[in-house]
Image (cartoon, helix red, strand yellow):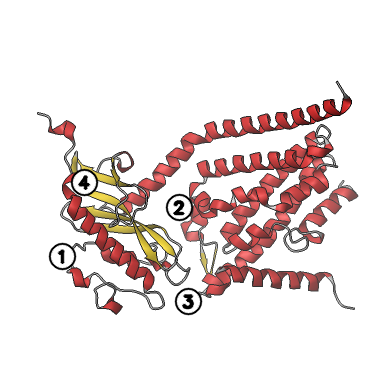
Amino acid sequence: MNPALRETLSTALTLLVFAVVGASLLSGTYLLTRPNIERSEQAAKRALLAQTLPPDGFDNDLVHDTLPLPADARLGLKRPGTAYIARLAGQPRAVVLEAVAPDGYSGEIHLLVGILADGRIAGVRVTAHKETPGLGDYIDIGRAGWIRQFDGKSLDDPAADGWKVRKDGGRFDYMAGATITPRAVVAAVRRTLEYFAAHRAKLLAEPDTEETP
Amino acid sequence: MISQETREIVVNGLWKQNPGIVQLLGLCPLLAISNTVVNSLSLGLATTLVMATASGSVALVRNVIPHEIRIPAFVLIIAALVTVVQLAMNAWMHPLYLVLGVFIPLITTNCIVLARVEAFASKRSTAHSILDATMMGLGLTGVLVLLGGLREAIGKGTLFSGIDLALGPVAKDWVIPLAHDYGGFLIAVLPPGAFIGLGLLIALYNRLRVTPA
């Protein structure tokens, strides 16, 4: 074999060995950490979902009791989302819907909207947003309690013309300096309620298994 | 007995050749994540850990890596180690992982890691390489924490906010409020604050090192 070729081959082989060692190190770590990562991701999700529901309002595992949501314009979803069903002793009591306010000041605001079976809101939380820190980020529960004013509201309370921020003649507070953000959230929550009203029967369907006599 | 060489490595990393403020390497995380002490410290320590292990591994195998492929081999080692750190943080420090987010994988592209591997670890003994990388990492962490503290104190009026993300709910009360009803000073928390803060730190450093006659 000519020496130049041999050197090239040995160089390539060295790099290959490094790649193989690196890859096996990664797969080992991945396998080792995967159960933990899944657990903490689900725990984080569970904790977030629980914030949008009354504390003693359900006894099932929300993360594993879901329905797919279509990419519906009212929910603002561009991709299919998820509805989490809250049950007490097997009976559906509430549902948590993923929704998106597409018209935030800096893009999409992702929401979780918890709705009780009677159509009242149990809680709303912002899961992701890019609003201006210090101005529009009061929609985040970590910054302010603003998002709590949706608790107990429904399609009839306030009536349709009250589902606006006060500046626009509605019933919802906002903070000076940022009205585009709350406007987007209020409208998105209202639309989510409308979606719920239209699909209530399907979202709160009794589980088939328990219906069989 | 500490040898002259060891002392030099320590002094270079922490002060004379401080990567954050003298070499001005690794500015990407420095500017992006340094808005609180906890974020700065966490990313700084993660970077230090990657630097120490990367430099150690490279120094170990420095004689078997052909010169032509040393950069791809180094990058492979660094990328693998960063991914291991990322998976470990995701598994065992999930809330903090969510905060640091994209900046953990970006440690790979932090030029200070590759710089120490190429300039030091590929030529020196394993022990010295690990020491050098650790000191450089701690030097960077020091600047990060200083800048993070400065920005957090001025921008939010607190210190150690978010510490519960790193240490669990026990640490919730460890946040130190510096002033009551502090309105916040937004620019310090936003990216421009990082540039201004770093500029001031560099100016201070130069003033300290070059004392006028």
First-in-chain label (3 vs 2): 2
Q: Which residue is mark 4?
A: A203
Residue B64 location, quadrant: top right
Q: Which residue is mark 1?
A: A156
Which-is-in-front pick, marks 2 and 4? 4
Secondary structure beneath label 3: loop
Chain of the residue where label 2 is placed in the rendered structure? B
- Residue A68 higher or lower than A101, as above or below: above
Chain of the residue where label 4 is placed in the rendered structure? A
**Disc 3 to disc 2, how far (Cα)?**
26 Å
**Disc 2 to disc 1, how far (Cα)?**
39 Å
Contact (CB < 8 A) between labels 3 and 1? no
Chain of the residue where label 1 is placed in the rendered structure? A
Secondary structure beneath label 4: helix
**Disc 3 to disc 1, how far (Cα)?**
37 Å
Indicate the amino acid at tag 1.
Asp
Circles 2 and 4 on the same chain: no
Q: Which residue is mark 2?
A: B169
10 Å crowding of disc 2: few (<14), some (14-19), many (20+): few
Q: Left or right of A169: which side holds A112?
A: right
> Farthest residue in the left direction?
A213
Circles 4 and 3 on the same chain: no
Circles 3 and 1 on the same chain: no
Front in this rendered view, residue B168 or A33: A33
